[in-house]
Image (cartoon, helix red, strand yellow):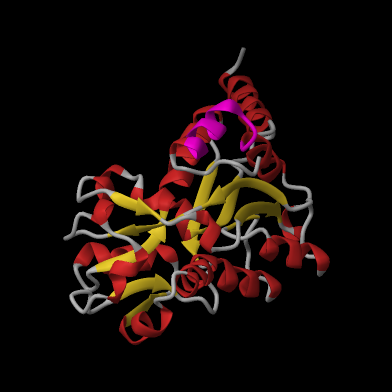
Amino acid sequence: MTVRSIRCLMFALALALTSLPVAAKESITIAAAADLKFAMDDIVTAFQQAHPADQVQVIYGSSGKFTTQIEQGAPFDLFFAADISYPQALAKAGLTASAPTPFGTGRIVLWSATEDARKLTLQDLAKPQFRRIAIANPEHAPYGVRAVQALKAAGVWASVKPRLVYGENIGQTAQFVQSGNAQVGIIALALALNPAFAAKGGYAPIPDTLYDPLVQGFVITRRAAHDPLAAAFARFIDAPVAQAILRRYGFAGAH
C-alpha cells in the first residue's frame, strides 16, 4: 500500500469517526421552594448517581415569585412548590406538562440560634426580650402565610406584628435567625432538621391545628413537556431513596 493510499484510508477513518452519533449531555433547571434546600440537594446527589453525565441545576426561592416567573416564561423545567396551590394555578393556566403531584407536607417550628427553642411557645413571643422575630414574607411565601395564621390563632399577633422582620423566602428567614439579626423565627421543620441548624439548639413544633395544612407539590413545566431528563427526575421522586430523604427532613403525610 502506497503512502498516499494509507493517508486516504486514515482520512476516511477519521471522517467516519466524527460522523458517529455522540450521546448528548442533558440538563434541567429546577425551581424549588427554599424549605427544600437541604432535602433537594440530597435528592439531586442521589439522582445523579444514576445520571452522572447529566446536569441538574436547582434554584431556591419563594413559591409565589417562581410562579410569577414561570408565567412570564422563565426557563424552569420542574417546579417544586411549598404550597401545591401554586402548581395547580400554573396547570389551570395551561403552563404545565404534568398534573400537580403532592410530595409532602410542610410544618412550621420555632427556632433560635441563641435561645433554647425547645422551651418556647408562641405565647413567649409576646415577651419584650424578643425584639426581632423573623417570618417569611406572607405576600409570596406559603410559610409566611402559615406563620401569620399561627400567630393570630395563638392570640399574639397584635403584640408581635411591630417586631416582625420578613425574609423573602423561608431560607432567608432562617438566615436572619442564624446570623442573630432576629432572636427567634418561625421557620420550616425541614430547615431546623439540618445538622447545621440543629447544632445550634433544638426547635419547638408549632401545633398544626393553628394553621392550614401546607401540602407541597411539583409539576413538569410546559417547556419540558418532551424532556426525558425532566420526566426521569419526576419519576425519581417516587423512588424509595428520594422518599427516604423527604421523610428524613420532615416531609410526610401527603404522598
Question: Can the viewer see residue 94 in this picture?
Answer: no
The vertical placement of 199 against 152, above or below, is above
With 157 as the anchor, is 242 left or right in this view? right
Residue 63: tell me if it is visible. Answer: yes
Horizontal side of residue 240 vs 245, given as left or right: right
Residue 108 x, y percent position in the rendering: 45, 57
Name which quarter of the figure residue 68 lies in: bottom right
Image quadrant in which the C terminus is located: top right
For image coordinates 33% across by 63% down, the residue present is 174
Give the camera-side residue of 126 and 75: 126
Residue 61: where, in percent of width, then height? 48, 65
Lateral position of residue 232 relative to residue 145, left or right: right
Task: Give percent across and percent down for residue 54.
Answer: 55, 39
Q: Residue furthest top?
A: 1
Question: Closest to the observer: 126 or 236?
Answer: 126
Q: Between residues 18 and 216, which one lies in front from this camera angle?
A: 216
User: Residues in magenta?
Assistant: 237-247
Of the 4 image quadrants, the one containing the N terminus is: top right
